[in-house]
Image: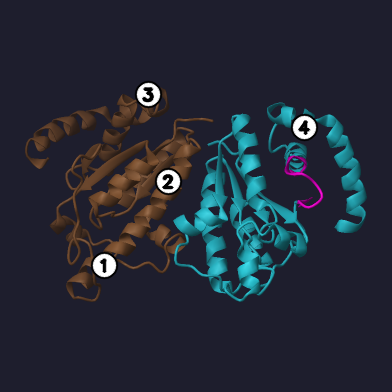
Chain colours: A brown, B cyan
Amino acid sequence: MRNHGFTIWFTGLPSAGKSTLARLLQETFEEAGLSVAILDGDEVRQRLTKGLGFTKEDREENIRRIAYVSKLLTQVGAIAIVAAISPYQRSRDRARAEIGNFIEVYVECPLQTCMNRDVKGLYAKAQKGEIKNFTGISDPYEPPLHPDISVRSDREVPLENIKTIIEHLVTHNLVSTSLVSHILREDSESMSRNIHERTTTNQWAI
Amino acid sequence: MRNHGFTIWFTGLPSAGKSTLARLLQETFEEAGLSVAILDGDEVRQRLTKGLGFTKEDREENIRRIAYVSKLLTQVGAIAIVAAISPYQRSRDRARAEIGNFIEVYVECPLQTCMNRDVKGLYAKAQKGEIKNFTGISDPYEPPLHPDISVRSDREVPLENIKTIIEHLVTHNLVSTSLVSHILREDSESMSRNIHERTTTNQWAI
């Protein structure tokens, strides 16, 4: 049995950029010839958790199911990429405990920026009271206490976030440098700028 | 991306022997070093489809979810083994269409034998009317029209059924002979008897 599977779990507010990063990471892994599956919130709500709502209980059950499928994918040696608000620390901790090889990626973005993006027009509806239990507006979001990786989607372009994640995976021997070196090499000038920026950022953002 | 994944889908009446075969096949693949995940009816009902009942609609949704997860596992190059009554031909056909590399295994066993086995004591309850919509008693089971493999669990011991399945997989280049040759070699005398028996059986059982 191959044993190099792991789960990358993106958590964050609606419109924080989880799906964008998940898809970019999926493409990166696929180009590197790795086996990868994506579990994105919206598709999961259609395929695994139809009928569940947005109460705390239903959100927890939603995450339990995603965690179960991610565990299966991880166990067969694949990379599971999850993009789900997953607002509760307890749910994410349980997912980590079940899956084992679990990398929690906090996609940090100020609420106001998420509201301005409002990719699906849901913040507007939530503010008008047309949607109840909307994370960030009328439902809580518990930021990760100890995420494995933290990225700022409002300060860096997605590719820079992806590099941060890949660097972590390489450092922790989860993917080999040779497979992803093209990503790490890419646009090294903007990369340097970015590293400088991140260093500055970290002094007050974390 | 590896592309040798496939799904083995066991269908049959309750107590026909689906779970037994699924577990044995899982062990066989694991011993051969292959990546395999099992989706067994009971665990699935706990982990993916809690809250669903046994109406036609709920059964179809149950199978759709299993098919979705099997597709993900198949796409990442793993072997998904499903053990689920999956009583409707249409549901199984949809699963085949979605998954692609799909091997339908009909675990055939006369209803009376399943009732005598009654592994979970559910036939007894169904007959007393304590369980409604019970497949074989108060709910339909549509036998596969064109299963890829058909095994008789009442006439052959599980190991012989497993050999039948492995032989099919080897013939169709889904697993390599070298990985499973120990299974095919094992107890060649009883194997010969069994082949003779199956030949005789097939004249009237199919």
Which residue is the site of mark 3? A177
Chain to which the residue tagged by mark 4 belongs: B
Q: Nearer the viewer, mark 4 or mark 1?
A: 4
Label 4 – label 1 distance at C-alpha: 59 Å
Give the quadrant of residue B85: bottom right
Label 1 – label 2 distance at C-alpha: 29 Å
Can you give x and y, in whole percent of width and height, for residue A163 in the image? 29, 34
* Kind of residue sitting beneath label 3: Thr
Q: Which mark is residue B184?
A: 4
Label 4 – label 3 distance at C-alpha: 41 Å
Q: Residue at x 51, y 55 (%)?
A: B44
Chain to which the residue tagged by mark 2 belongs: A
Dot 2 falls on a residue whose secondary structure is: helix
A186 lies above or below A120 = above
Specify the segment rendered in magenta.
B150-161
Give the quadrant of residue B5: top right
Label 2 – label 4 distance at C-alpha: 33 Å
Q: Nearer the viewer, mark 3 or mark 2?
A: 2
Taking B15 as reference, is B69 left or right? left
Q: Nearer the viewer, residue B189 or B174?
A: B189
Which residue is the site of mark 2? A70
* Kind of residue sitting beneath label 2: Ser
Give the quadrant of residue A116: bottom left
